[in-house]
Image (cartoon, rainbow, N blue to C red):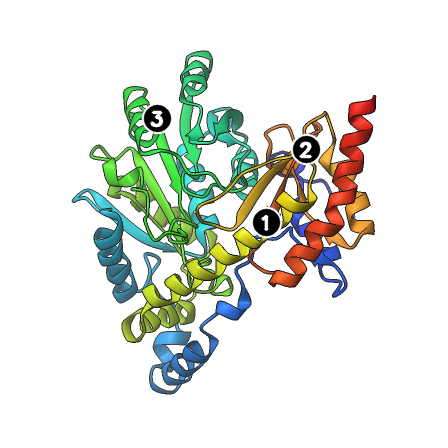
Amino acid sequence: MEFVVSNRMSKIKGSAIREIFKYAADPNVISLAGGNPDPALFPNKELSVIAKNILEKEPVLALQYGITEGYMPLRETIKKRLKSIENIGNDYDELVVMSGGQQGIELTCKNLVNEGDTVIVELPSFIGATNAFRSYGANLVGVPVLEDGMDLDYLEKVIKENKNIKLIYTIPTFQNPMGVTMSIEKRKKLLKIAEENNIHILEDNPYGELCFNGEKTPTIKSFDKTGTVIYAGSFSKILAPGLRLGFLIGDKNIISKVTVAKQVSDVHTPMLPQLLAYEYMKNYSIDDLIKKMRETYKHKCQTMINAMEEYFDSSVYYTRPNGGLFIWCDLKHGIDSLALSKKAIEKKVVYVPGNTFMVDMDAPCSALRLNYSTMDDEHIVEGIKCLAPVFNEAIKEAENN
């Protein structure tokens, strides 16, 4: 029988990151490509004890259907923590537990964006989000990201030039893929621009807890007094990604429709992961776990930067994150990082080419994303040493042409 893909999916390309994982599965390959947390930081012993107790004492609660909004004690715990550490939560806000932060992004788009409507994204931006927007027929418009976040002058130009703008998507803290953080001044101005133009902001913050110095930048949502901001959070980077737990908080009128959309999607987030997360936060200190993560990733990030300073050509630009999991590296000189990735694979090292994060994924891009969270120090340094001759030779060749 002939297979014909739907129009909405016909232009969606699989994530290059997933394709790269095929090479990364080779134990001889050094992967600087993924966005996975360090598995050594998973609280597997504690979760094992919790899981045993849950399945012995509350098997029906864990294995039966739950409500779409999420397990109430977990929701209340998340709300209290958000209010305490982020100053998030107004009288008009509501929270729903998601099957990962990605679902929060997808269902927000499903509810707010019609086919042909415009969604403004950062350039570069997270492919999981851009593909979600593409799947609903959105017109994607990119706004460049600078060292201190989105270029707001360019954003205002984009708003004047485009119609039916429904959403501005941003990862303002330790942005994926660049690792940069939007300044407080820009956060406030972005919110003002969105309010004046009646555009919702989808603030995606999976990395915000992973600040190396322990000082978190206030979220855009914390400044929101009008229900403009929809905030997506996740347990993937601060507990374990395999639990597939995230949450969405925003104006209760929007969240109520998101809840209906979730009923259509998966009925509810699985109960066992919700109970695991709730019991972990009830009986252990998630803040102590996060502190350990911050220290680990700070060390790994500096290890990578030190190696880049030593081995990369001086013309290579790279960001110096204060948190998160990623470094953005630009080889410049018109070099195509996708084509160059084949030579890197020959050296048994993989990275994510920058075109993956662009609105136009077919256009050559000289930048790339490097990840430091999953490899140990030795492999981080070795990976950079292997990439250096590939990059430096390409730069030399480009300069001579």
Q: Which of marks 2 and 3 is in front?
A: 2
Q: Which residue is drawn at 72% across and 36% down?
A: 337
Residue 167: horizontal and vertical position, in percent?
41, 30
Q: What residue is shown with label 1?
A: 306
- Answer yes or no: is residue 371 visible: no
Q: How crowded is mark 2: few (under 14 residues within 10 Å), some or many (20 or more)?
A: many
Between tags 1 and 2, which lies in front?
1
Secondary structure at numbered mark 2: loop
Q: Which amino acid does label 3 sit on?
A: Ile
Q: Mark 2 points at which residue?
A: 331
Measure the C-alpha gap from mark 1 to mark 2.
17 Å
Query: Of 140 and 185, which appears nearest the observer?
Result: 185
**Location of residue 362 with respect to 383 vertically, above or below:** above
The amino acid type found where label 2 is placed reads Leu
Q: Which of 15 and 255 is in front in this view?
A: 15
Image quadrant occupied by the C terminus = top right
Residue 199 tag number: 3
